[in-house]
Amino acid sequence: DIVLTQSPDSLAVSLGERATINCKSSQSVLYSSNNKNYLAWYQQKPGQPPKLLIYWASTRESGVTDRFSGSGSGTDFTLTINSLQAEDVAVYYCQQYYYAPLTFGGGTKVEIK
Amino acid sequence: EVQLVESGGGLVQPGGSLRLSCAASGFTFSRYWMSWVRQAPGKGLEWVANIKKDGSEKYYVDSVKGRFTISRDNAKNSLYLQMNSLRAEDTAVYYCARETEDYQIWSGYGCWGQGTLVTVSS
């Protein structure tokens, strides 16, 4: 199974500053035939289902603010939240859909400093 | 409006069974792979199972293989999860989720239901 390790487990960022979350995969999720990274990022607020932010590692889901961006390839990925807002307080998860079983990272809790 | 609505959760004793349902609306259900994802209280997300558009392929996480069965009825726009031999560690909110792209096998979950709580306890 592919193991996704997120870091840090939690971080506190001042309003307007940048938050950076990392996701490391135990094996590459880059499919060479189409050059796509099979990795997504989600935001989950308390009492709500997850919300897709980014897929194919860097494609922003429709309607998601451009303050969220994804980068990386192969085994190392990053979710960046620019100019952190109060509504960004949440837990963020990465997920690989390269092959089954699909797996999620352990989550990163983002709070306001 | 794209919508997924789960039902069927509740309290069940260890060793018991439950059948979860997910009613889909607002999109062509038969064009998408569908999945179940669960979240134990205060814990992270765990993928449980998924099923191909026509039901011909199914995949499961090891911890539920042989106990859970995913199925779908495209005529009724519905997804199901039959859960047998339930254990305390199956206690979780179970979400129904839809792939974000219909022309890819898997592409990330662009649509989620609100979830249904399954509690396994004596």
Image (cartoon, coloured by chain):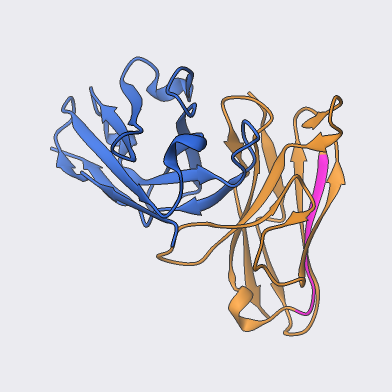
Q: Percent from the top left, x then y, of residue B2?
A: 44, 57
Relative height, residue A46 to residue B66 (above, below): below
> Could you tell whether A71 is left or right of B44 in the image?
right
The quadrant of the picture occupied by the N terminus of chain A is top right
Specify start and end residues of the magenta stretch as a single range: A76-83
Chain B display color: blue
Residue at (77% x, 41% y) in the render: A24
Q: Is residue B16 inside the magenta stretch?
A: no
Residue at (83% x, 42% y) in the render: A76
Of A9 and B57, which appears nearest the observer?
B57
Residue A19 visible? The answer is yes
Relative height, residue B98 to residue A32 (above, below): below
Relative height, residue B45 to residue A50 (above, below): above
Q: Percent from the top left, x then y, of residue A113?
A: 68, 81
Of A59 and A70, which appears nearest the observer?
A59
Question: Which of the 4 quarters of the picture holds residue A79?
Answer: bottom right
Q: Is residue A81 inside the magenta stretch?
A: yes
Q: Percent from the top left, x then y, of residue B107?
A: 65, 40
Q: The orange chain is which one?
A: A
Residue at (19% x, 33% y) in the render: B18
> Could you tell whether A68 is left or right of B73 in the image?
right
